[in-house]
Amino acid sequence: MKKLKVAAYCRVSTEHVDQANSLVSQRRYFSEYIRSHSDWELVGIYYDEGMSGTQTAKREGFKRMIQDAMAGNMDLILTKEVSRFARNTVDTLYYTRKLKEYKIGVIFTIDNIDTREQDGELRLTIMASIAQEESRKTSERVKWGQKRRMEQGVVFGRELLGYEVKDGKLYIIEEEARIVRAIFHKYTNEEKGTYVIARELFEEGFPSKSGLLWSNASILRILKNEKYVGDLCQKKTITPDYLTHKKKYNRGEEEKIYITDHHAPIIHRELWNRTQEALRARTFKAGEQQKHSSRYWCSGKLICGRCGRSFVSRTKKRKDGSLYKAWRCSANAGYGREKTDDLGRKAGCDNQTVSENALLSCMDFAAARVPVSWNSLKEEVLINLRKLKPAEGERMEMERLTRKREALEEKKRKAIDLFLEGMLSREDLRKQTGWYEEKIETVNRQIHTAEEKAGVVSGDFCEVCHYRELLDEMLNIPSARESIYREILEKIIIYDHNTMAVWLKCLPVGFHMKIRTSGRGENYTTKLLEIKLLRKEKKPAGL
C-alpha cells in the first residue's frame, strides 16, 4: 500500500534559549509521531525561529514548505496548533484552502482539526479567529508594557553615533562623541553646509557609525537628534497594525514620550539651541528656494555619465543682479574631485558644471529634429475629440462608485452575520462596521461630486488649428518652453560640460551631442559641433 508523504511545520516566535529548546522538542516530537504511523513517510520538518505568526512574508521555512507542497512533494502536513501555523485568520484560511486544491490536508494535532474532514474548515476558522484575537491582545499588552518602561526612562532603539545602549541606558563613547561635537561646531559656529561637512569628515578620516560614506542626510539626522543634548524622545515610530508589523513615523497618531535631562549630554544646551535655530532658518530659506526650483524642467533627469549620480541645481547671483543657473554632479557637490580613502572607499566625481542655457540649447536641437507631421497630428486630435462624449467618463465613474458602495454594504452585512454566528466580538463588530460606514460615506460624497460634474459638462467642441504656429509661439516664452521640455524629456546623460546624450520620451533613439559654449549673460551662445543618433538597445557606457 502506498504510504502518505507527511511533513511537519514548527515555529517559535523568539530566539530565546527556552524557545529554542521548544523548537528542538517540537521537531523531535513530530519525527517520532510520524514514524509511529506505518502508513506514513516522513519527507521533511520545516521550521521558523524568531518569527511572528501574524504574517508569512518573512517566514522562509513556511514559504519553502508551501512551495514543496505545490510541487507534489507531500500529501499531508502536521503542526501542533493553529497559532503555530498562523495567527492571521486570512493567512490560515488562504493557505489551507490552497493546499486543499492540491489535495493536501493539514492536521493540527493539539486542536484536533483535520482540514480533510467536512467540518474541518469551520472549526479551523473559529480557532484561527481566536488565535488572531490572542495575538492582538498580546500586542496590546506588549505596547502597554513598553510605554510604561519608556515613561520610566528605559531606552528602546538602536545605538547611535556617540552613544551605546546598555541595560536600557545611554553611555557616551568618547571617541565617537568628538565627531558629534565637530559636526555641531562646523554647522553652527562655522556655518558650513551639510554637504561640506560630509566631505570634510570623509577627508579627515572620521568613520560613520554604519561604515558607509557620510551624506547630508546623515549629518541632518545627527543635528536634529535630541539625545545629544541629554534629552530622550521615544515613540518617534509606531506599529499601527499588529498583523503586518510595519512601522511608520508617528505624526501625532500616538503621544510621544519626551524626557528632559535624561542622560549625560554630548552637546551643551546653548549650542543645541543655536543649532536648532540655524536649522529652522536654513530650512525656511531652502523652502523659499524650493518654490522656484519647482519650475526646474530637468530636475531628477540629469545623470552623470561618469559616476551615475544625479545632477543638482546651483544658482549664483552676478554683480549686475542677474542669476546664473548651472547643474553639478551631486557627488562632486558633496565630496569634490574623485578620491579614495585609506579603506578603499571612493567619493567625489571629476565631472564638470554644466550651464542650464547649454542644456536648453541641446533640448532645442533635439526637439527640432523630432519628425512630426503637424497636419496628421491635427486630424488625429480632431477625430478623437469627435469620438469623445463628455458625459461618458462621468457616467462610467458613477457606475464604478456605485458598485464600490454596494460591495462595502455587502461586507458590512457579512460582518453582522459573523457577529450573529458568534465569530466576531461586539467590539470587533463595532470597529468593523464603523470602518465600513466611514468608507461608504466617502464614496457617497464622491458620487455626489461626480453627479454635479456630469451636469456641468456641456458645450460644443472647439476647432483645433495652428498647432505648429502655437508651439513656436510657446517656445519663445521661457516658462512655457520649460513646461513642454519637462513633459517630453526622459533624461540627459552628461559626460562633461561639452558632451551629453539627450533621450526623449516615446522615441527609440537618443541624440549624442558635442557643443561649444562662449560668452556670458546676454552674449552667451551655444554652438552644436556634432550630433549622432543613439539606439536605446545600444546605450553608451554610463547610461
Image (cartoon, rainbow, N blue to C red):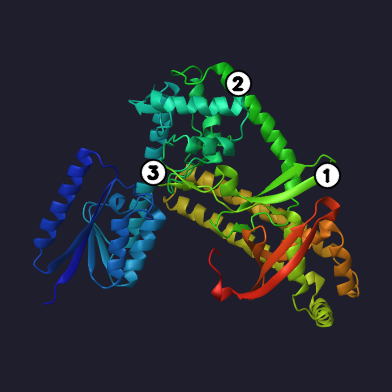
Residue contact at pointers 1 and 2, CB within 8 angstroms:
no
Query: Residue 13, position in %: x, y?
Result: 29, 44
| SS assignment at label 1 | loop
| N-terminal-most mark, 3 or 2 | 2
* Residue receiving disc 2: 273
What secondary structure is marked by label 2? helix
Residue 18, image x and y in percent? 20, 39
Q: Amino acid at mark 2?
A: Asn
Displayed quadrant of residue 514: bottom right
Give the residue number, with chain letter if any, for mark 3.
343
Mark drawn on residue 322: 1
**Residue closest to the eye, 17 or 484:** 484
Residue 256 in view here: no
Type of amino acid under label 1 = Ser
Query: Could you tell me if the residues under marks 1 and 3 are in contact, i.e. CB atoms within 8 Å?
Result: no
Q: Residue at x 63, y 58 (%)?
A: 496
Amino acid type, label 3 = Leu
Q: Position of residue 541 (x, y in %)?
A: 53, 66
Who's the residue at 58% across and 61% down the image?
407
**Position above or below: 54 against 486:** above
